[in-house]
Amino acid sequence: MSNLKIAVMPGDGIGTEVMDAALNVLSVLQNRFGFRLDLEDHQGGADLYRRTGTALTDESFEAARRADAILFGAMGLPDVRYPDGTEIAPHLEMRRAFHLYAGVRPVRSLPNTPSILADPRSRDIDLVIIRESTEGLFYSRGKGTIEDDSVARETLVITRDTSERLFDFSFRLAERRRERRGREGRVTCVDKSNVFVAMAFFRKIFDERSKGFAGVRADHAYVDAAALDMIRKPWEFDILVMENMFGDILSDLGGGLVGGMGLAPCAEIGDEHALFQPAHGSAPDIVGQGKANPTAMLLSMAMMLDWLGNRHAMPSLCEAAEALDRAVDVAYAEKIKPFEFGGSDGTREIARAVWESIA
Ligand code: ATP
């Protein structure tokens, strides 16, 4: 036993299906790489809310706080809402309460998956979007005002403290990717500093922090130019770091570049806590049919293993993470074609192909 506790929250709809698949793959990895995580299962989500009036109990919330990492499926159902009409999304509450400032969205082409770009270099897309997730324009969530039905206001907030952490996190990630990929590390600050003083402040802090990471190239792009280049030449990017609202938009653009919802992993990382989940929702339209693609969940779990291994100096976890990433590539290259892309492989077949590919 590693004594590392994982709060496992499968949630609603296909969240439970992709989580089952991930835990099966995890047990193969544990045996192969000789580690053991202490898994604690917690119910939560829209279905629980419908049945009990609570989306996530205080006990589960506190268990998530105490855990070394949170592995999350998907929570929310279209027909279940809080009385004020908002979605059931306990992970947004955790984002705030646990100060999960770095929203990490890898965008990587997998073999044999459809690309919307005709250019063959789109096979080489391997970038990471880091979306600041606790402030920016979303800081205004729930605080906006409308005056006399004639003017509406929302306020964007950038703080030095969170920005420094965000940029340091981004540069450290670039250093790790440089080692793993054997390519120059690069971090691009995406902003609108030519228009907004808050964005110029964001960029200034980026430039200051970049000086501590001499081995990584630091550059800038205005958000409009970055959006264009993500379509024109996304294979040239490594890490793009940005304010919350810009990250919300560009991470969906990134997901769209490399295929379906079932492929996009996500991590929400702070200094003391981290939550790992697929970027997709509970997909009620395919629930119970065995068609959900567990790849995003598996890649999110790989990010969790890597983060835990790095944080707790446990190389076997980092090796397991790399092996899982590689196994996903092998499975797509040689063994599977998911329902999502017109094939006939569902949750079980994909999970099995991945665990059989773990070297
Ligand atoms: P949310 O608002 O909860 O993020 P959403 O309404 O944006 O959710 P999803 O639940 O992610 O949407 O589903 C969007 C579409 O993508 C649906 O057609 C769904 O079937 C499909 N989809 C989502 N996840 C997967 C998956 N893992 N495998 C296959 N298809 C998926």
Image: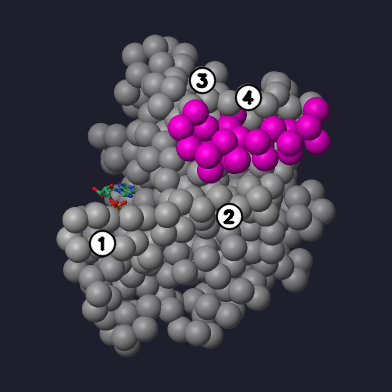
Do we see residue 296 in this rendering?
A: no
Q: What span is colored magenta in the figure? A: 188-214
Residue 210 image offset from top left, x and y in percent: 73, 33
Do we see residue 3 in this rendering?
A: yes
Residue ID at (36%, 83%): 54
Which residue in the structure is indicated by mark 4? 219
Q: Nearer the viewer, mark 2 or mark 3?
A: 2
Q: 248 left or right of 220?
A: left
User: In whole angstroms, how far apart are the C-alphas of marks 4 and 3?
Assistant: 16 Å
Question: Do the residues bearing badges 1 and 2 touch, measured as CB atoms within 8 Å?
Answer: no
| Image mark for residue 146 | 1
Residue ID at (35%, 43%): 261
Q: 22 left or right of 316?
A: left
Question: Do the residues bearing badges 2 and 3 touch, measured as CB atoms within 8 Å?
Answer: no
User: In whole angstroms, how far apart are the C-alphas of marks 1 and 4?
Assistant: 38 Å
Between 198 and 220, the one nearer to me in the picture = 198
Question: Do the residues bearing badges 4 and 2 touch, measured as CB atoms within 8 Å?
Answer: no
Question: Do the residues bearing badges 3 and 1 touch, measured as CB atoms within 8 Å?
Answer: no
Q: Nearer the viewer, mark 1 or mark 4?
A: 1
Q: Residues within 10 Å of mark 4 (few under 14, many from 20)?
A: some
Q: Residues within 10 Å of mark 2 (few under 14, many from 20)?
A: many
- Label 1 CB sits under 8 Å from any ligand 1 atom: no
The C terminus is located in which quarter?
top right
Counting residues from the start of the chain, the first of labels 4 and 3 encountered is 4
| Image mark for residue 101 | 2
Q: 133 left or right of 359?
A: left
Residue ID at (50%, 85%): 58
Residue 61 image offset from top left, x and y in percent: 53, 78
Where disc 3 sits, the SS reads: helix
Which residue in the structure is indicated by mark 3? 235
Amino acid under label 1?
Answer: Ile
